[in-house]
Amino acid sequence: MQVSIIEQIKFAVIQLWRIRQIAIALFFVIAVSILVVGYFLPRVFVSSSTILVDEHNILTPLMEGTAVATSVKDHAKNAWQLLSGQHAKESTVVFISDEVEGLTEKQLDQRWEQIRDKLDVQNVGKNLISIKYKHSDPKTAQKFAAFFTDLFIDESVKDKRRESEEAYGFIASQAQEYHEKLKSSEEALKEFRSDNLGASPDSAGTVSARILELQRSMEQTQLEITELEIQMKNIQDQMSGEAQVSAHLTEEGQLQERISSLQGQLDTLRMTYLDTYPDIVIIKDQIASLKDQMEHVRKQDKKEIKATSTLNPLFQELRSQFSQHSTQLAALKTRLKATENLLDDEKARAKQINNVDAVLAQLTRDYDVNKNLYQTLLRQREQARVSMNIDIANQGLTLKVQEYPIVPIRPVGLRLMHFVLVGVVLAILAPIGLAYGLVMIDGRARGALEIQNLIQAPVIGEMTTYRDTEFRNNLMIWFSIAFAVFTAVVAIYGYVAWLRIFN
Amino acid sequence: MSMNKLEKAISLTMNAHEFDDIQFSGIDASKSMEEIAKMSFSKVSEKDYLDRKKIVYPKCSQEKLVNQLRDIRTELSKHQVKNLVMITSVIDEAGVSFFSKNIAAVNAFDASKSSLLIDCNLTSPSVDDTFDLKGKPGLLDYVLNQEIQEKDIIHEVGISRYRALPAGNMKAESSEYFTHPRFKKLLFSLKNRYQDRTIFLDAPPLLDSADARILVGLCDLVILVLPSGKISKNKIEAAAKVIPKEKLMGAIINNNIY
């Protein structure tokens, strides 16, 4: 069922009139209670400082290329950490020592909690932080804001100093460490070199030349030995062919020779004659006698060879040569052995030289690395020393208070002014809203269309209020009451504002 | 009102006849209807009197209200034969009595018509108060006392063509009166005596009393007075169902801001 807006407003106005007592009371109560709330709500004053914080960290440039320092961006968080820590608490307790005298540790903690709750640190821009302190008293707000600003600066400077000192200490300790390392590697190198004097890398050429020479010499000796051995074999052969004693050799030989010639004659005769042939028999006899003779000679030989024979001169010659050669061979063999030993030695040395080479390379590398690092650290240590000195002299300070906290004049948040406005508006709107709400939800019939639908019969007319003097008087009275209440509220507001402004 | 002269004359004669059997209070019975019409509202004191009673009269200060009532009267005049109009509501204080006495007054503006207002609020009558009829015999007296005649209970109220029948002096104790044959006889007699007279029954709220429901059965038409924004929709719906459709003429929205 559609009810026009104008009709709704009309109904609402009538409804408002019907609930006029409630409406006026509501207006008054709301207006006054909001004012009371606004008046007694504690005012909050905020005093704040703005501080420029440099982003650079002392370690960053120092450790550039060597180490990476963690970069820190959230200055406000850092500042908050600094200002809410134990150190800050102690400083604060000293700052408010008058107030906290005689408090127990627990009470002190609670007081510190309260103070910390009122403190706020915010990032207000790139490298800008704001330290805020809120309090119901503007002067106290300023006092604490200033205190915390100073505390932050102090602590930051101390921190910075500590940081550079630590950086210097760190670099110095590193330098010291590398110094030790350098020294030990130097020592190791020296020791190793002196331990392997002959095996210096320079002697590698000499050793290989010597090895070659020794090998050549060995080959030569080998050749000579072979030659000598062949000669000796020859001499031995010759010596076995020569009679040691010449006489002994002639007699037996003569007999053998005669036997051989008789045998020849016999063989020839046997080809033409039978064995019975006399010649043959004679020859046979001759041979046999010769053989006997030779047997006899052989027997005699054994008994009286020395007495009867003389030494063969050729044999003597050969024997002297042979012994000469054997001596030479023995000498050569000894030399070969010695050369072989020498070669082994040289080979071992060559191997050692290679080992030494590797170890030396490693030692040298260690030494070089340590030396480089040490030199770098030395340079950085000197830079750190300068930075530290600058920080100690407060010259490298990267904090700057851009705005020092002042005593705030106006409170933040909802002020009495807001409450006044809200109070008036709400107080006026509430009764109207109530009336309108009733029209919307009280389930009562108001419009003609509505009623027509309900009774299934036409609405044949309307009847307005009988506007006589009584009605007008009544109207006047209620408007007067409403006006009086409104005036009273305005007066109360004015009085409260006057209280606030002049007190 | 467009009525030809003949009709006017007839109605005047009938009106005059009516006045014959009525005890006039302070007004000479021999004066003709026309004369009464002429002398009506001529005095300042009468206007004061009506203003005080919150009853409208032509050219009174309640222009808007009068116009609204005139419109309603026009609607009413469409039902010529049905001249027994019951005015009721759903709740108390709905403005039924105010509407009844005023619609009767507006009806009586027309010289060819007359109004009779019967106070049927036996438990809380108001007509006697309005027209200073305290102590005068009324409905209850008539029903309970055989000796009292119709003419004894119909009272002149100082307005031309306007008569009132108060509730009476006796205390009402039950709803038996409206079912009483004498009451029915009275209504029948009043309804049929003058064709140009409209009888307005100032009745109690429908849902609260059996009286009202009995009256619904007796009357010709029912007008519901519904104050805007005071009655729940359910009640209105329930009340409308009590009234037979052919009798329910319609509703008057009472925009009284009180």
Image (spheres, coloured by chain):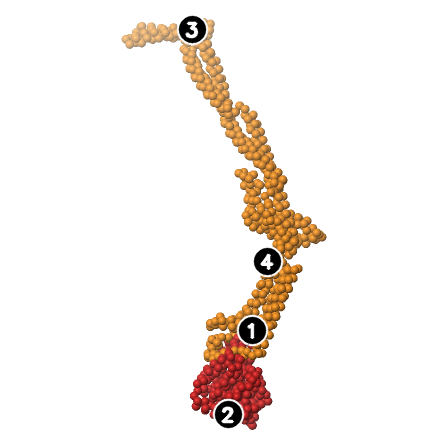
Dot 3 alpha-carbon crowd within 10 angstroms: few under 14, some 14 to 19, many 20 or more:
some
Farthest residue, direction bottom: B147
Distance, label 2 to label 1, CA atoms, is: 48 Å
Residue A264 at what x, y percent from top left?
32, 8
Q: Which residue lies at the image location 45% right of the left edge and 83% below the top edge?
A: B246
Q: Which mark is residue A246?
A: 3
Point 46% across, 79% down: residue: A458
Front disc: 2 or 3: 2
* Quarter of image, res B209: bottom right
Residue A176 sits in quarter: top right
Name the residue that disc number 4 marks. A413
Give the x, y percent position of residue A148: 63, 49
Whether labels 4 and 1 share one chain: yes
How busy is the neighbourhood of tag 2: few (under 14 within 10 Å), some, or many (20 plus)? Answer: some
Kind of residue sitting beneath label 2: Ser
Residue under circle 1?
A17
Q: Position of residue A414 (x, y in %)?
A: 59, 59
Which colour represents chain A?
orange
